Amino acid sequence: MRWNSPLKYVFLLPTVIWVLCFTMFPLLYSLRLSFFRVNIGQKDIFIGLENFARAFKDPNVWNAAKVTLTFVLVGVSIQLVLGLLFALLFNRALPGRNVLRTIMTLPLFATPIGVGYMFITIFHEEGGFIRASLGAKIPWLSNPNWAMVSVILVDVWNWTPFVFIVLLAALQSIPEEYYEAARLESSSQWELFRYITFPILQPSIILVLILRMSEAFKVFDIPFSLTSGGPGIATETFSMLTFNTYRRFFDFGYGSALAYLLLIAVAIIVTSFFGRIRQAYT
Amino acid sequence: MRRIIGYLVLISLFFGWALAQENIKWGDDGSLTIITQDDHEEITIPADQVGTLFGPGEQPFAGQRIAITVNTGGPKGGISGPLHQLRPAWEQLTGAKLDIVEMPLPEQLPTTINDLRLGLNQFDGFIEGAWYMGEYITPGFIIPIDDYIADPRFPHWDPNWMPPSLRNIYTWENKFYATLNDSDGQVLYWRNDILSDPEWQAKYKEEVGSDMPFPVKTWDDVIAISKFFNGKNWDSNDPDPDSGVVLHFKVNAQGHFHFMTMSASYVVRPGDTVDRCTNNYWFDPATMEPLINQPGHVKALEKLQELAQYGPEAQAAWDLTEGWDYFMRGKAIFTFSWGDVGALVQDPTRSKIQGKLGASIVPGSTDVYNMCSNAWETLDEPNVVGNTVGGSWQGIISSRTPNPETVYSLYSLMATAPVHSWNTQRGWTGVDPGVSIDFLPPNGTATLEGYEAAGWNPDDVKFYTQAYYDNFYAKTMMPYIRINGTEEYWRALDQNLSEAMIGRMTPQEALDRTAEAWKGITERRGLDLQLKQYQEAIGYHP
């Protein structure tokens, strides 16, 4: 087939249609909605940027932003540290290492929404597993601070294996010769980690960090099933607020504006992150 | 080969036998006996209530298939259970197929409204909460059923069984849109064995210095008794201390209904008229100004906070079933909740307190806030206000269905007196009593023997049915709203109440924030439309 054959457009067409229908159309349609007041059975009214202005005055939005940021910063940091530690541990020659590695990765295959419901039975303050086995009466779900801790703990349980798998794969790709050569200079494990392991792992850590952060900013399923955003609105994340606004209250205009605000915020954070990385590596 | 053929024959015989199982029986007198799906219980409907549509060998809707949405619960779950249990019988009667589409409570309204709005029309009917009705009625998504009710072809149920308070939430502008099913309202439950025990009454007097205010008349009485019992191991079921009260305040899980129930007596002034300060609760009916942050509401929330501190701390994150289970395990003196509690208490697999139950209409308050004069009024007798809080889950028919008669035939079968009673006498069905056929004489036509045959304790039945009769026939009722956006108004209230109950906001802050949110909702949805619907909802005539 000649490169300038018109047939190439036929092959491109399915992809173009897919992108237009399933990426561009929803994006543009929700962008349009965000500038309108939409009520079922009534004509849409153009209100310009009013939905966006409303978001900045809405205390629930500020609360959701705070909850989401706390969740991302604390949760992803713990996952990263734990995932790295486990990867370093399971990269060593341990008895039953393969079995333990498999067990370590199991939470990753559990559906987050189901995990949330499962942990209700573990955290239940009267008859839950922790209360029954330890006897400790901790207000896991009824106290706003503890509820946030619970949500983060469950997310850490669910997603640390992802960090573990990626970093373990990266660790296993480091040639043993590097360490053998380094041991001629130093036998300190810390120095080996600092000057060999960590620099080589850095690109993988950054990749994991970006993937987990962009996912964590959108978190919905675990707080939805575990706490319903409560008590009060102590664990209501930005995605939950957007979902409730759009789907439960049919406030399509405002819900779209909130979705765009989240999109913009995540885009800014991830792009600036990429920018810093690019600076560091060029 | 012979062996394989033999197995195939056996399997075919088994399935043939299974399919041939009868789910209905016709009596010689024309009566119809329905056999439930799981427990194979028999419910007999007399011939004069069956209607002419069904008959031996008749299958009037053969080949049709309908889909009904309902709360997630499964074959033995609240509200969904009765559909499952009756499905085989109804399918055999009609020849039609029934798809039961279960959805979690928060998903039901969005899913069905989106379906109707987009014209997908996947569902023929909905078992909906009464507060959704405005959302369905305004765009014309459901149809009135008065003609069907009067049609002798369908199974017979009588709208006159309903008290006016319930009739109000099954109708819209005097037209019936829903068939009789559930009757929701909260009443006060207590441990009668403990509170009527002279020893505990003496201990109360010794510790508090006054007689135990029992039977309770006001919310202050409930608070005082709860305070006394909380933290004491007054029940021998376990060695742990017990609670004075148990409620449920998990956000998005109907906890706000507790506040509505309790606050009504501080807010709803009795009288023959309807205006801002009489028989009103939510908005100023002339302007749609939210009244939720008025002093009566605020004081009620303060009282609720005070009461809740005598319950388990965990109740801040509990949904209603967790609260019920705590009460049924014998861990709390009081709860105020729906009819499910009284019926579930009769199930010895879930309850330790059968025969120990007391129930009455919720207590009142001697202080009522007048929202016209902006002053508190003190009454000689407590202001006791009945309520219909909750969903009163009821069957409605989509205006888009090609098979409305098929749907109505199912709903009307469920509304017949024998099926309705079967439902209300079994706690797991989630169908609560509220109509004359549920009450004992002289209030109604039910019999003590009927309840006893379903495993009820006779003393519990007397308390329970009288409590519900008093509640639904109360002289003053809390107005119910079903206007557009009720879900959204209540969600804002629920969230802020939950914030107040965990101490992150004061009652005044929580209700001020609710009022602000309500103003925004009204403005967005259109003041004129909201005002008109609200005036109609509470019977206000400008």
Image (cartoon, grey):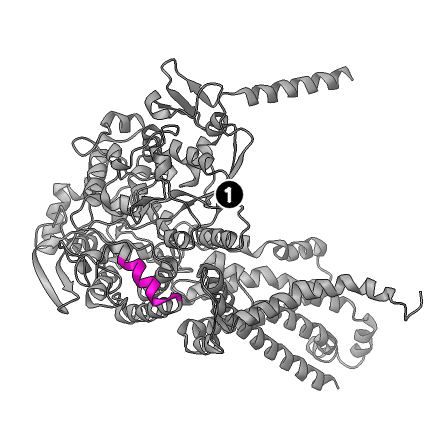
The 10 Å Cα crowd at callout 1, few under 14, some 14 to 19, many 20 or more, is some
Magenta highlight on residue B531: yes
Q: Residue furthest top?
A: B28
- Residue corresponding to mark 1: B101
Q: What residue span does the magenta drawing correspond to?
A: B525-535
Can residue A217 be seen at all in this image of the molecule?
Answer: no
B450 versus B330 height, above or below: above
Residue type at the position of mark 1: Val
Q: Is residue B226 left or right of residue B409?
A: left
Residue A77: image quadrant is: bottom right
Report the front residue among B122 and A134: B122
Q: Main secondary structure of the magenta part?
A: helix
Q: Is residue A119 left or right of residue B214?
A: right
Q: Chain of mark 1?
A: B
Report the front residue among B331 and A196: B331
Can residue B424 be seen at all in this image of the molecule?
Answer: yes
Residue B464: image quadrant is: top left
Q: Residue furthest right?
A: A2
Report the front residue among A117 and A56: A56
Q: Is residue B517 left or right of residue A47?
A: left
